[in-house]
Image: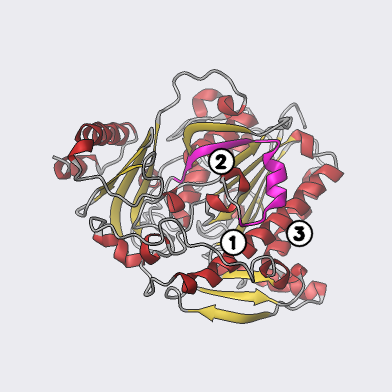
Amino acid sequence: MSNNKPNILFILTDQHRVDTLKAYGGKTCKTPNIDLLTEESVVFNGAYASCPVCTPARASLQTGLYPHNHEMRNNTYEPGCKFNELPNSPELLSNKLKKQHYSLGYTGKWHLGFGPTEVGYDGDDFPGHGAGGHDYVQYHDYLKEKGQEVKLENKITGHYKGHWAAEVVSPVETTVEYFLTDRAIHYIDQFRQKSNPFYFQLNFWGPHEPYIAPTKYLDLYRNLEIEPWPNFYDKSTNKPTIHKVKRSGTTEWKKFEPYIKHYYANVSLIDEQIGRLLNYLKEHGLYEDTIIIFSADHGESLGIHGGLCDKNFFMYEETCRIPLIVKPAKKLEQTRYEDRFVGTCDIYSSILDWSGVPEEEINRDGRSFVPLVNNENVNDWPDHVVTEGNGLAEILYTQRMIRHGHMKYVFNCGDTDELYDLQNDPYELINEIENLAYKDTLQPLRELLADWMEKHNDRVLEQYKDLCR
């Protein structure tokens, strides 16, 4: 710890289901290093993405704003983005941290325009989507420097248009995940020589497709028979039509299973690299002085509800809920679970809070959850959280989801709304929107969402009121 301020390490994965992690009840996917981190951390059970799409969620992390306010509502260079490059404003996370005299580092997926060095980070610029990181010259230069070549074999395709998986038969050192961890260690090694604290963000492209993993990790799952998701077979007839946009051409579980094995294998690869980075921190006396945040931009579907793929156009738990695990600078003696709702914008506020930014400057669309991490008595924490959707690629489509208690309401503009009782129906199989028994539950939820829209300057409010009369 430098100048009485903690170092902050933020590890972000992409399109990561919470049920791959033991902390969230996962039983199949092996993540021993994240499990060890969990034992010393606060685990947030009710963490939700600002939006289940990469660019909007990542812009929320850098701005503390929901997509309708930062106006990068779709992936960059697609309809719905007022900005295709993240504007370099004084309120950005990087600029706020710089004023607190932090050394700032960033590597991995950015997906917010040209690159993080344009807004004040030291690190690597990987503009665009990145195809899992395999397209970048820096990665190929790294391989040449190491005298290595990445070799992919046993490629499979067909479960959903454009998605594929493959086996890495070259050494683990040839993977993008290993390369990124090397880059993180490189920068942190420079920062630790300085007197000021560091903020570093390591951003894996995985486990987002393409689902690529070395033989070593695929062997963990290759011969397993994976049971279908509890909501794989969904016979509900009153689900929104828009869901069809992301429905696979197959409803056979066996056709999804190989992709899920590759997905799990990539998670296990990422886990090993996280372990390598955490060991580096311990070896150099940094671990105890570093706040470690592990999270994801959003989740993944992988065949839920009759073969849905990718994300967005539906607001199911698998895509909207995110892992959020926080190790304080002084690690906990055992895992503590926090059930109150938090969201992507709260991560921005919390990082600024830890860095010493004055309270009046840290809260935009979110607020700091540092008091929750510190186990302080907080009586006014919001009892709800919202995820917004604005479409994907060439289809613009307005959605708002609100969680309150054990209920979830989804506003699907011009389509069938959804209402789920997650206590009685945790896998969201039964849409209760037309069930008169829930009439007295639905209206307060709609009003609560309207109040949230007004508070957060969501310009959908007036049309929402018209549609929900």
> To which residue does mark 1 refer?
206
Q: Mark 3 or mark 2: which comes first in sequence?
A: 2
Does dot 3 land on a helix, a strand or a loop? helix
Question: Where 454 falls versus 394 (above or below)?
Answer: above
Q: Which residue is mark 2?
A: 93
Are dots 3 and 2 in contact, CB under 8 Å? no
The reply to whether the magenta stretch includes residue 163 is no
Counting other residues with Cα less than 10 Å from the Cα at mark 3, is it few (<14), some (14-19), or many (20 or more)? some
Earlier in the chain: of badge 2 and badge 1, it is 2
Q: Amino acid at mark 1?
A: Gly
Q: Secondary structure at mark 2?
A: helix
Rendering quarter of residue 3: top right
The location of residue 244, given as percent across then percent down, is 30, 65
Secondary structure at badge 1 equals strand
In the rendered structure, find residue 434 and report the number of the disc placed on it. none
Task: Examine the rendering and report whether any part of residue 190 can be seen.
Answer: no
Closest to the observer, 169 or 179: 169
The CA span between labels 3 and 1 is 16 Å
Residue occupying image coordinates x 56% and y 41%:
93
Q: CA distance from mark 2 to mark 1?
A: 23 Å
